[in-house]
């Protein structure tokens, strides 16, 4: 925010120092206002110098705040040169050259404040920071380029008016003719100069032909600047506009490729229409971006934090995951996968093996009977189903199979968590695993779908298996201890034999 204030002061000087130096009527229009604005900008410059000298910087990724180090860094960076030069009190020249004496002459005394333009690096720094932080970088770049064009045309208009003064107003057709009622007004002087500058720099021409060497040289310089600078600027604007539409172009190319494939394979019109409607839905809901490709440049830690920020609240809606350890939830968040279902698609059918659980992010689902017509229930955003089947609880009367048909009414976005991903995450969280199993059993008991006898038997077998594993581990540890002891005794015996052989050889 402070850089924005400094940039406003720099932009004021860029526009009005040269403008007031050339257009004397502008300089004389409101002296009190110009004095107020000038010295307000000087105060901003002074404060910015103090702030700049104590501005923190990153050293090995850490923000340095030590005052002495900050000052040394500021002096070593050579930024202080432009800061100091822009604050030189050149206004003292007003003692010998009062600004009130500016009457039909160019330049006016305000030209002595030209050193204030040396603060431009701070405005450039503001533009760079804003461009990296804004959510609309392409729009900001276009606005920045447009501002640069307007400032360039403004300066060239001022140069044209100054050269007209130097050659003589109205001395030929090329220079500005100040005589006449309307031509002598400030508004007409500036508007015509700006108009002439625009036509010349954009190489449109259609201006009066130069008549002497100075005029020819100035026009040639303007044409060269227009060809080189404006061609570059227009090219940059074209690239920015293209970048704004790059996602749309990629999406359109992908859809065209699918259309060509369907035409080549002679896909039915009905299926082709469904595919096109799916493409339209994904684009309308901003789902055409490849998230993995977009986030590929980020380190794993930042990608994980983004996923946690976006999906953690969704995962907490699942009953069996409520009150789970934060570490487990963070691991599960990274394993969620978004799936989009079209109208009429079955997410699961009755009797299917449950390998995934689903969380409805957007859309509506209907639970239908076997005839496909009778609607038993409707699921909306935030609903969860299939969470018990992924736990593989022994004694589940459904045999970990789906108990209903679930169909998408319109386009539906669902988060999917596979059974394999869940158990991979639970491997490092045994307490959370036990807690989840308990919650799953409670849900099955509530619905009368838990065979207590089979569950108890499985628990006993699991405990027996655990005991066997523990005994094997103890036996293995004992064997390792005995082996280590035998190895140490063998090494000691070898050492003693070597000593005896050495003594025998010496005798």
Image (tube, grey):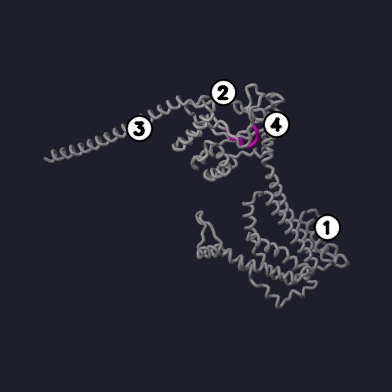
Residue identifier under label 4: 276
Q: Nearer the viewer, mark 2 or mark 1?
A: 2
Which comes sooner in the sequence, label 4 or label 2?
4
Disc 1 packing (10 Å; few <14; some 14–19; many ≥20): few
**Quarter of the view holding residue 367:** top right
State the SS at label 2. Answer: loop
Report the Cα–Cα distance between label 3 and label 4: 59 Å
Instruction: Please provide percent x and percent y for residue 252.
Output: 69, 36
Q: Nearer the viewer, mark 1 or mark 3?
A: 3
Report the Cα–Cα distance between label 1 and label 4: 54 Å
Report the Cα–Cα distance between label 1 and label 3: 97 Å
Q: Please tell me whether residue 202 is drawn above or below residue 24 in the rendered image.
A: above
Report the Cα–Cα distance between label 3 and label 2: 38 Å
Residue identifier under label 1: 207
Which comes sooner in the sequence, label 3 or label 2?
2
Q: As drawn, is 125 to the left or to the right of 213?
A: left
Instruction: Please provide percent x and percent y for residue 444.
Output: 52, 29
Residue identifier under label 2: 351
Q: Are marks 2 and 1 in contact (CB under 8 Å)?
A: no
Q: Are marks 4 and 2 in contact (CB under 8 Å)?
A: no
State the SS at label 3. Answer: helix
Quadrant holding the N terminus: bottom right
Q: Residue at x 17, y 40 (%)?
A: 499
Which comes sooner in the sequence, label 1 or label 4?
1
Mark seen at residue 2:
none
Residue identifier under label 3: 470
Instruction: Please provide percent x and percent y for residue 330.
Output: 52, 41
State the SS at label 4. Answer: helix
Q: As drawn, is 454 to the left or to the right of 78?
A: left
Which comes sooner in the sequence, label 3 or label 4?
4
Q: Are marks 3 and 2 in contact (CB under 8 Å)?
A: no
């Amino acid at each position: 925010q402070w850089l924005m204030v400094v940039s406003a002061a720099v932009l004021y000087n860029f526009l009005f120092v040269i403008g007031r130096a050339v257009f004397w009527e502008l300089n004389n229009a409101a002296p009190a206002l110009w004095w107020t604005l000038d010295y307000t900008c000087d105060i901003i410059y002074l404060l910015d110098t103090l702030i700049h000298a104590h501005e923190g910087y990153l050293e090995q990724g850490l923000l340095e705040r030590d005052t002495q180090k900050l000052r040394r860094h500021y002096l070593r960076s050579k930024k202080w040169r432009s800061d100091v030069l822009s604050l030189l009190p050149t206004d003292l020249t007003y003692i010998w050259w009062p600004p009130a004496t500016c009457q039909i002459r160019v330049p006016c005394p305000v030209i002595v404040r030209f050193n204030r333009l040396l603060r431009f690096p701070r405005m450039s720094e503001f533009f760079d920071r804003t461009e990296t932080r804004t959510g609309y970088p392409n729009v900001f770049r276009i606005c920045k380029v447009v501002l640069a064009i307007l400032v360039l045309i403004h300066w060239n208009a001022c140069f044209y008016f100054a050269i007209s003064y130097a050659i003589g107003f109205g001395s030929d057709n090329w220079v500005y003719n100040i005589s006449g009622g309307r031509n002598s007004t400030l508004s007409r002087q500036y508007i015509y100069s700006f108009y002439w500058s625009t036509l010349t720099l954009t190489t449109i021409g259609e201006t009066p032909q130069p008549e002497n060497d100075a005029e020819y040289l100035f026009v040639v310089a303007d044409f060269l600047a227009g060809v080189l600078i404006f061609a570059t600027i227009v090219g940059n604007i074209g690239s920015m506009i293209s970048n704004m539409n790059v996602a749309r172009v990629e999406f359109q190319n992908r859809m065209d490729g699918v259309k060509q494939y369907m035409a080549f394979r002679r896909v039915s019109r009905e299926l082709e229409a469904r595919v096109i409607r799916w493409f339209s839905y994904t684009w309308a809901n901003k789902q055409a971006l490849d998230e993995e490709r977009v986030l590929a440049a980020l380190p794993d830690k930042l990608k994980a934090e983004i996923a946690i920020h976006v999906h953690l609240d969704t995962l907490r809606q699942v009953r069996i995951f409520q009150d789970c350890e934060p570490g487990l939830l963070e691991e599960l968040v990274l394993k969620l996968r978004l799936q989009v279902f079209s109208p009429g698609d079955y997410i699961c059918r009755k009797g299917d093996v449950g390998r995934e659980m689903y969380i409805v992010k957007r859309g509506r689902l209907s639970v239908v009977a076997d005839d496909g017509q009778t609607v038993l229930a409707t699921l909306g955003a935030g609903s969860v189903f299939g969470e018990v089947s992924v736990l593989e609880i022994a004694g589940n009367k459904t045999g970990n199979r789906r108990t209903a048909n679930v169909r998408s009414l319109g386009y539906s976005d669902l988060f999917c968590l596979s059974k394999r991903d869940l158990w991979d995450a639970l491997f490092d969280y045994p307490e959370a695993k036990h807690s989840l199993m308990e919650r799953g059993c409670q849900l099955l008991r509530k619905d009368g779908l838990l065979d207590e006898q089979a569950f108890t038997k499985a628990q006993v077998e699991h405990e027996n298996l655990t005991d066997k594993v523990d005994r094997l581990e103890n036996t293995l540890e004992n064997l390792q201890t005995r082996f280590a002891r035998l190895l140490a005794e063998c090494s000691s015996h070898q050492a003693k034999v070597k000593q005896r052989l050495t003594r025998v050889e010496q005798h």
